[in-house]
Image (cartoon, helix red, strand yellow):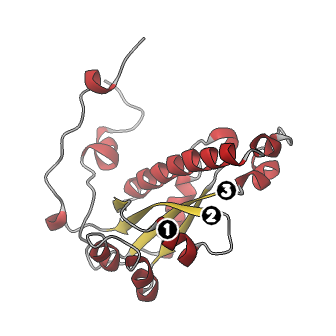
Amino acid sequence: MTHAISDDALDIIFRHARTQNKWQDKPVSRALLMAVYDLMRWGPTSANVSPARFVFVESDAARKRLAALASEGNRPKILSAPVTAIIGYDLGFAQHLPRLFPHNLDAKNWFKDPQLAETTAFRNGTLQGAYFMIAARALGLDCGPMSGFDNAGVDREFFAGTEIKSNFICSIGYGDPSGVFARSPRFDFDEACQIL
């Protein structure tokens, strides 16, 4: 089967990519972080709402602040990673729609219901978090996504005074193969999919 991108690229992004638990002592440049964001931002979201917000935790002090709010098993991963991204979603995303969705200036009024706004922000912010990991892998980084942390604590510590809520965190850098677990199974097509 012919693909739009090479099998090697698909291996890097999906087939051979692994969740990292240990990290090489190798920094990730600011230019590379910017390149990851510049690539992932082109992924589609509903009405281009683009609610994802990223805090790149890099300094020792910031790593300790984040690690203190993580589960015991995730603390060493955060402390040893060159960068851990806090991937959040902005509940106030609609205020930006006149700029981001200019062909319908009424779009910001679609999300006046707080429940709809939260659902939209969470769904599309999660989607953008997945784009972030794909972009990071495509640009040569490894990823270690995590959900074991105190969301409310992270929101107080890193998003105070904003409408941003934390979704998940993802360490990025250059993985140490010795920390990779054996590949876990996945569902086959017929177990997870239907064609109607």
User: Which of disc 3 and disc 2 is earlier in sequence?
Assistant: 3
Looking at the rendered structure, the secondary structure element under dot 2 is: strand
68 vs 48: above or below: below
Q: Amino acid at mark 3?
A: Leu
CB under 8 Å between callouts 2 and 1?
no
Front-most of residues 195 and 140: 195
- Residue visible at 63% across and 54% down? 51
Looking at the rendered structure, the secondary structure element under dot 1 is: helix
User: Which of disc 3 and disc 1 is earlier in sequence?
Assistant: 1
CB under 8 Å between callouts 2 and 3?
yes
Q: CA distance from mark 1 to mark 3?
A: 24 Å
Q: Amino acid at mark 1?
A: Leu
Percent x, y of residue 12: 31, 49
Circle 1 sits on which residue?
33
Label 1 crowd (10 A; few <14 / some 14-19 / many >=20): some
Displayed quadrant of residue 110: top right
Residue positioned most to the right: 105
Quarter of the image for the C terminus: give it: top left
- Residue visible at 44% across and 82% down? 65
Q: Is residue 86 left or right of residue 173?
A: right
11 vs 166: above or below: above
Circle 2 sits on which residue?
164
Displayed quadrant of residue 147: bottom left
Q: CA distance from mark 2 to mark 1?
A: 20 Å
Tag on residue 91? 3
Q: Amino acid at mark 2?
A: Ile
Residue positioned most to the top: 196
Percent x, y of residue 164: 62, 63
- Residue visible at 26% across and 54% down? 18
